[in-house]
Image (spheres, rainbow, N blue to C red):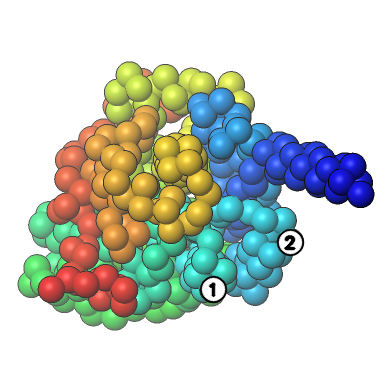
Amino acid sequence: MLNRLFAGLAAAGVAFGLAAAAQAQAPFRIGVMEGFTGVYGDLTAGEIEAIQMAIEDVGGKVLGRPIELLSADHQTKPDVGAAIARKWFDVDDVKMITGIGTSSVALAVRKIAQEKGRIDINSGAASADLTGPACSPTGAHWTYDTYALAKVTGGAVVKDGGDSWFFITADYAFGHALERDVTAVVQASGGKVLGGVRAPLNTQDFSSFLLQAQASKAKIIGLANAGGDTINSIKQAGEFGIVKSGQRLAGLLVFSTDVQALTLQVAQGLVLTEAFYWDLNDETRAWTARFRKKKDKLPSMLTIGVYSATLHYLKAVQAAGTDDPKVVMEKMRAMPVNDAMTKNGKLREDGRLVRDMYLFQVKSPAESKHKDDIYKLLATVPGDQAFRPMADGKCPFVKTN
């Protein structure tokens, strides 16, 4: 009888040990979700390779488990993004999702992540609502947001005499938030908004919108759009001779990939805000050289943004000794963010990564030494000046008193 009991206990111990060993070797899954095709396809190309670099930089494992990266195209559709997030969390046991460009998708995914108590680190979407009304104890907003774009680019343009504006706005959450935040900056500086028009996402013909902007006589035409929409609106504005007639374009979210698609001949003189430029210093140049061995294109702030977010997350998991979302988020807030993009960044309680932002101007063809030499640095804006004060965001779970 006792022999059978001991044998049963031994078998149970072996089974438990095997189960523990299997768990230790089970993949530690993270996911990157983006609009990898469509209007933002060019912007998001290279994000998978950048995240693979972050995985390499922690040795390919965390908590003794091999790291596995899942990727998916949400097609800039909120329902598709929400369905992917739900499957990843429920079925695939994905611990963290990053990327998540397109604000409407990001807000939908944020709801799922918060419901499941999982971590989403948004790098691609811009709406500052992600650290305001839609904030989450397990959510972060990493690279830039509409408030910072408005404060840095909008503020610089108004200071330079651009005191009357007309907006051409992408008609969804991102465009609405960007127009709102730039309008606040313009009006606070004594400027006026003379009007605006909203254009559907992935618009091919901006002629009617540009004619309305031209007729407004506003000094500044604010482009509250991104990606292919920004490229098309700037190109078509050139065809209409808008800049030659005296009005100026303000690209409120412009990436290095957009500038190269436009060419310096078309984009020269544009003032814009970015969180990263490949040629800022020796470290950014070295990171870019390493990235280009994997993906031969110029990295944008979206590219290195997912690298930075993933690297900090994985370091925090290892330091915490657990993948428990709340414990990991506490560790992410406690640890300073230091990498090729960010120096001494601080993740706030509302999920906002506070870091320096940069005001650039696109070089003229005569100023450029080679095809990737596209920006000149006008100003470095400290994070506590670029991003919205936490008390003003009205994040529901943050106590500001």
Question: Dot 1: within a 10 Å radius of its alpha carbon, few (fewer than 14), some, or many (20 or more) residues?
Answer: few
Mark on residue 378? none
Where is residue 383 shown, x and y percent of the image?
21, 49
Dot 1 corresponds to which residue?
115
Q: Looking at the image, can residue 238 be seen?
A: no
The residue lying furthest to the front in this view is 1
List x then y, in percent, for residue 3.
89, 42
Above or below, 293 relative to 209? above
What residue sits 31% from the left and 57% below the top? Answer: 352
Q: Position of residue 165 (x, y in %)?
A: 24, 71
Q: Quadrant of residue 65?
A: top right
Q: Amino acid at mark 1?
A: Glu
Q: Residue at x 31, y 63 (%)?
A: 350
Q: Is residue 13 visible?
A: yes
User: Element under label 2?
Assistant: loop
Asked whether 41 or 53 is in front, the reply is 53
User: Where residue 281 sits: x, y (%)?
Assistant: 30, 23
Residue picked out by circle 2 = 91
The vertical placement of 121 against 2, above or below, is below
Count residues near mark 2 (Cα–Cα under 10 Å), then give few for <14, some for 14-19, many for 20+: few
Kind of element beneath mark 1: helix
Q: Residue at x 26, y 70 (%)?
A: 398
Q: What is the spatial separation of the Cα atoms under label 2 and label 1, in whole angstroms?
A: 15 Å
The amino acid type of the residue labelled 2 equals: Val
- Quadrant including the C terminus: bottom left
From this view, report whether residue 4 is shown above or below residue 122.
above
